[in-house]
Image (cartoon, rainbow, N blue to C red):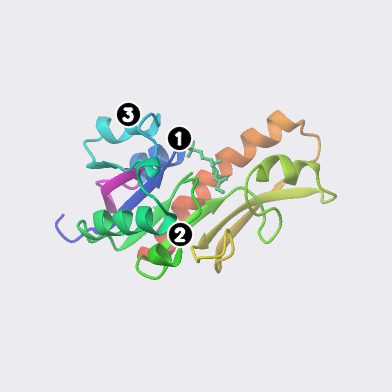
Amino acid sequence: MANRKKIAVLFSGKGSNFAHIVKHLHAQEFEVVVALTNNANAEGIEVANAASIPLEVIDAKTYESREAFDAVVVERLQAYKPDLTVLAGFMRILTPVFTEQIISINLHPSLLPRHKGLKAIEKSYEDEHSYGGVSIHYVSSELDGGEVILQKEVSKEGLNFEAYDEKVRSIEKDALVEAIRKILR
Ligand code: GAR
């Protein structure tokens, strides 16, 4: 189908959310036209290769500022003309160089505005609420601060940390696919 909407996916590590997008959306409803990572050793690179998705590796260490890195990311992404860019475990703070040019969404494993930043699953598990959850939000230049698109709650009741973590990592995948459909359909 030539008229499928185009998705770009950014990841930094394992890429299990990227793999979920590929399995459930790629070459079906939508097309993942490029995958981009800042980590040359990311396990997610295998996902791109296995699905023959074009891959861009941009090593942040070789750029002198966040803005310089973001400018290269923007340039590479724009060449693929994505309708939507998805941050699926992309562990970098983005500057306005990126956020003002690219419409993107991010997956964050807490009920924002609770627990922005790193270790959100641990912090959610340890807080005073009886449930945590996941959020999908538009990316702005404020870390984990853009408009929320959808959230899903995860009850902590009866769960040790490992079981809670596993549940969050399962539910975040459904939430991400649901948000992409909501935006692009
Ligand atoms: C996911 O759990 C995602 O929610 C989290 O990183 C993990 C990436 O896993 N993202 C954040 O914490 C963003 N601040 P993956 O590489 O297997 O998809």
**Looking at numbered disc 2 in the image, what kind of residue is underneath it?**
Ile
Q: Which residue is mark 1?
A: 13
Query: Which region shows up in magenta?
Result: 25-37
Pick whichever, 34 or 77, lies toward us.
Answer: 77
Label 3 – label 2 distance at C-alpha: 23 Å
Camera-side mark, 3 or 1: 1
Residue 34 included in the magenta stretch of the image:
yes
Label 1 – label 2 distance at C-alpha: 18 Å
Label 3 – label 1 distance at C-alpha: 11 Å
Q: Using the rendered view, name the quadrant where residue 5 is placed.
A: bottom left
**Looking at numbered disc 3 in the image, what kind of residue is underneath it?**
Glu
Q: Which residue is mark 2?
A: 105
Badge 3 vs badge 1, beta-carbon distance below 8 Å: no
Badge 1 vs badge 2, beta-carbon distance below 8 Å: no
Q: Residues within 10 Å of mark 2 (few under 14, many from 20)?
A: many
Q: Which residue is mark 3?
A: 46
Pick whichever, 175 or 11, lies toward us.
Answer: 11
Q: Residue 175, position in %: x, y? A: 52, 52
Q: Residues within 10 Å of mark 1 (few under 14, many from 20)?
A: many
Numbered disc 3: secondary structure: helix
